[in-house]
Image (spheres, grey):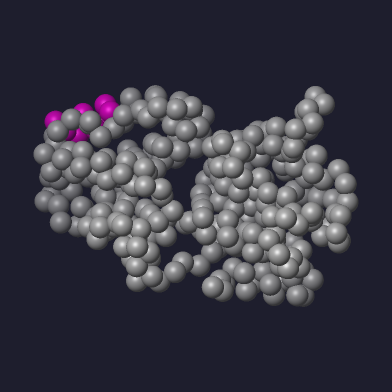
Amino acid sequence: MSDPLLDRFETERARGVLADAYLMLGPSRRRLRELALDAAARVLDCRGAVGEHADFVLFDPQALGITGLKVEHIAVRDGDDRTSVEAQLRYRPLQGKRRVVVLLDADHMTADAQAALLKTAEEPPPGTLFLLTAVEQSTLLPALRSRCRTYRAGAPPAAELARRAAAAGIEAEDWALLCQAAGRGETALDWDAQQRQQLLALHTLFRRWMLEGGGGDWLRLPQGTLAEQRISLHLEWSACLGWLGGAYANADPALALRLDQLAGALAEALAELAGQLAPGLLVEALQKEVFSLSLV
């Protein structure tokens, strides 16, 4: 299926005006991966699987078993010969004049890794093209964004997304809740079954708080590393903001005030979540806010 992003990319390629680095944005990480691989295949004039091309380099955090790329995936440090971007760029392209380096989930890349990439992205070796994908821009360093030409991926029609959801075994009522949580259906489809169940279970607790004003049992610190905690909390708090928006229209004045106050607290916490403040401290602060709102 054609995509406006690929159409624009193909036009620039045909005219010989490709940038050195591109940032592909969209709500679906899976779709962004497909678009990046397709774009790479076009640049390399690849007839077969692009992953088998000698001048194609892919850095996929999921395949590496990590949340996001780290410094060691970008720079060669202290003689470490593990595969990194810098190691891959030591030699000229093997099969032609072009080489493509794809960095998936750049918004999950550590700040140090992003900083290590700045110089290379600004002045890559001749013939090298970078393709970065991201769902969120807020976690990307402004300096890195400025070095990339930004593309936004198009979204399939709502009816097509609903059909895919039904094919995946998602009930219509659950699909509506997930779409509200995600803001866009394509993002909801990108979540795996475990994430969908996590959010649906969260919604049960969150809805109870909205209707009954009980405790904050929907708000807790997830397990995992700091990076994993940030990602999980971002998922849950963003979903709560989506549900708040849906509930606000039909709320009585007292409930509307509580929802509005909570929305402000969640938005502030999400902004701070991208910084250096520990997730545990943010959860504690929100728990106090939720407790005070429950007493209104």
Q: Where is residue 266 in the image (x, y as percent from the top left)?
A: 34, 40
Q: Which of 161 and 233 is in front in this view?
A: 161
Q: Tell me the residue at 28%/28% (across/down).
A: 287
Image coordinates of residue 100 in percent, x first then y, are 74, 55
Residues in magenta, as a range:
287-295
Let me know if residue 152 appears in the view.
yes
Image quarter of residue 212? top left
Quarter of the image with the C terminus is top left
Identify whether 283 is placed above or below 250.
above
* Count of numbered circles in the view: 0
Question: Is residue 89 left or right of 292 when viewed as pictured?
Answer: right
Residue 237 seen anywhere in this rendered image of the structure: no
Residue positioned 73% across, 68% down in the render: 47
Q: Residue at x 59, y 62 (%)?
A: 35
Q: Is residue 263 left or right of residue 230?
A: left
Q: Is the residue 276 above or below the residue 105 in the image?
A: above
> Residue drawn at (38%, 70%), measured in percent from left and top?
160
In this image, 147 relative to 98: left or right? Answer: left
Is residue 290 part of the magenta span, yes or no?
yes
- The verdict on residue 267 being magenta is no
Considering the image in quadrants, where does the N terminus appear? Answer: bottom right
Measured as percent of width and height from the top left, residue 154 is found at 50, 67
Query: Residue 28, percent across and down?
Result: 48, 56
Q: Quadrant of residue 156?
A: bottom left
